[in-house]
Image: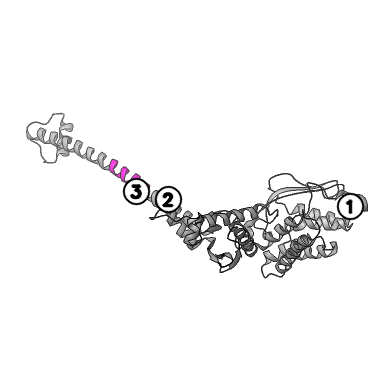
Amino acid sequence: MPTTPDPVEIAMEAEASGKAPTGEASALLRRQSLLIDEQIGLARNERFRNRIRSVRDMAIAFMVVALVVSAGAVVWSASRTTGLVIQPFTVPPELVEDGLDGRAVAALFQDELVRLDRETNSARPPASFRNDWSEAITVEVEAGGLSLTDTYRALTRWLGQETYVSGGLSRTPDGLELVVRSSDGTGITVQGSAERPGQLTREAAERVYEQTQPYRYAVYLGNRAEPLLVGPEQQALLDRRRAILTELSSNPSETERIWGYNGLTRIRETPAGDAISLLQAGLEIDAEHPVMLINLVASQTLLGRSEAAVLAAQRAATSCPVGATGPRSIRTGGTEVVCRARRFCRTCKGIFCTHWRSEPMLRSGPQLRRAFVPTPRFAWRT
């Protein structure tokens, strides 16, 4: 008979004596063995369930993090959104019956803004404007119900920097009147013939373009005046351009002021000496402004200031970042200054590609002056 009821001790005694247990002791050991197997199985199942729970918890944590990151990205994207959103204009019923509804008027207005932006040949990127539409010019279409697009649109309206434009077209005794209002509080009114609604939207678009992007509008006026014959029409465009640039040169904003200086230097009537003073005033605001530096090289060259032109070219070349795309080399005692780089400018707030070349820098006077004559790769920038 076993001396203890403990199965483990019974098994140990049997092992020590060399005799197999019998009777109740044997049955107890068998039951204990089955219990141990069951416990092992339960332990394995519990370990497996723990692993599943760990994977589940990790997946839930990952999903929560992903949702938080996604929500943050959406909010960040909405806060960075720029562009011009043209809302459908209000139109009287009689004009709607003629096929000129609010969306059609908004689309005509949009087409004119796109045309103005496309015809403005300027080095200044739209992204540097307080009111810009560098990302998009769209017509807002209202839809029923609430969707993810509507939610994102609400976020961009709340957090973004979009400029919203609305307006209305109405009849007058003399024809039509178009009123355009923007979300920054500005508004314009134009009147014209009922037979030429496109002329109304064209004039309104130019007025809005002038209010929101005055520098680029001034460049646009210069581009328009360039192919015209000398006469009152051309002079009116050039006078308007000068007035806008002069106003910008005294603007409280450093960004507007530096571009105003740059634009005035590109006016034909501005003497080269005055142009250099304007450029230097702009470079006091931003010493590495690529467009100002390029124009400074050109102005110094026109005055025959070879050494000053070379120093300006070297200064422009060294302003290009070392890791920029494209070749970058400076040979201070040699034959070439080349800079071709995509770079970021503090007051430009946009990407430029600048490229200029000076031939042998040790040449004197007229020879070096001829070496700096503008070529397709070296030109003044507006």
The numbered disc on residue 57 is 3
* The quarter of the displayed image where residue 185 is located: bottom right
Q: Badge 3, how many Cα within 10 Å: few under 14, some, many 20+? A: few
Residue 285 visible in this rendered orientation of the protein:
no
Let me know if residue 336 appears in the view. yes
- The three-letter amino acid code for the residue at tag 2 is Ala
Between disc 3 and disc 2, whose residue precedes? 3
Disc 1 on helix, strand or loop?
Answer: helix
Query: Over which residues does the magenta segment extend?
Result: 47-60
Crowding at dot 1, Cα within 10 Å, few <14 / some 14-19 / many 20+, comes out as many
C-beta proximity under 8 Å, tags 1 and 2: no
Regarding mark 2 in the picture, which secondary structure is present there? helix
Q: Please provide percent x and percent y for residue 86.
A: 53, 58
* Numbered tag placed on residue 67 in the rendering: none
Protein image colouring: one colour
The residue labelled by disc 2 is 66
Q: Quadrant of the C terminus?
A: bottom right
Q: Which residue is mark 1?
A: 369
- Which of the marked residues, 3 or 1, is nearer the chain's N terminus? 3
Disc 3 or disc 1, which is closer to the eye? 1
